[in-house]
Image (tube, helix red, strand yellow):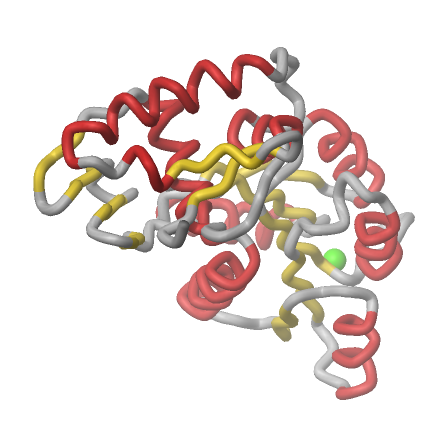
Amino acid sequence: MAATILVVEDEPAIQELISYNLELAGHRVLRAASAEQALEMVRSELPDLVVLDWMLPGMNGIEFARRLRADKRTQAVPVIMLTARAEEQDKLAGLETGADDYLTKPFSPRELNARIKAVLRRRAPQATDDAVEIAGLRLDPGSHRVLGNQTPLTLGPTEFRLLHFLMTHAERVYSRAQLLDHVWGDHVFVEERTVDVHIRRLRKALEPTRHDHLIQTVRSAGYRFSAGD
Ligand code: CA
């Protein structure tokens, strides 16, 4: 499953190189040449991850990361910071601001891809291509298949994304509003009962192999994927 990655970099050649490689790796790329422009973009769409240059004209990368962390809506977005300076002090400052990782220029595209993968795995597993398997139910984002005890199950695209999110966040309860934010995207305006409709369809799709009970309703809280009771 492709992640949406916002690249904030003012040097056109580097922005192009990074974006090209991320697209090659299957991601969807949003580009900004300044922190101000990036803030504007984040207001309309929340990316799965931000690749952020430290030295930017106007607001610098540190300040931009600080702003992301200060806002409830954006505080969980993972950030990988890029810098031309290798000083240990800078690295500490970057990580203190809440960057999840830190890369010193020049770096290879392969190195950046590896770091992105590691950060997504840790912070946004639903945006990776890793297969998930719980209690005999297997979801493979790469081949876009769901197997219940090895039997292929048919899911619509929304049910697939919903199941992917729930399985990568198993045992945690999510409200309808949170599921809308994570699965539909927080820039999409749909009613909360839409979630109920798709949960119903999802359970129906999992019925043939009796995996529907893994999708649990938590009264007055929301839904949870659980292999327990
Ligand atoms: Ca720069």
Q: Position of residue 32 (x, y in %)?
A: 69, 39
Judge from the rendering whether residue 188 lies leftward or rightward of residue 150; answer left or right: right
Is 62 on the left or on the right of 191, as rendered? right
Judging depth in this view, the residue of 105 and 181 nearest the camera is: 181
Q: Is residue 121 found left or right of 5 in the rendered image?
A: left
Figure disc tally:
0
| Residue at the spot 77% in from the left edge and 65% down from the top edge | 98
Is residue 119 rendered to the left or right of residue 208? right
**In the image, is residue 176 above or below residue 83?**
above
Q: Is residue 22 visible?
A: no
Picture layout, residue 223 above or below residue 149: above
Q: Is residue 118 above or below residue 42?
A: below
Residue at the bottom extreme, as displayed: 88
Quadrant position of the N terminus in the picture:
top left
Q: Quadrant of residue 54?
A: bottom right
9 or 132, nearer to the observer: 132
Q: Position of residue 6 (x, y in %)?
A: 62, 43
> Where is residue 185 shown, x and y percent of the image?
59, 28
Q: Residue at x 63, y 69 (%)?
A: 101
Residue farthest to the left? 151
- Residue for point 25% across, 24% down: 205
Image coords of residue 119 (percent x, y):
53, 63
Q: Quadrant of ligand 1?
A: bottom right
- Residue 160 visible, this angle: yes
Task: Name the residue: 43% across, 67% down.
Answer: 114
- The quarter holding residue 221 reads top right
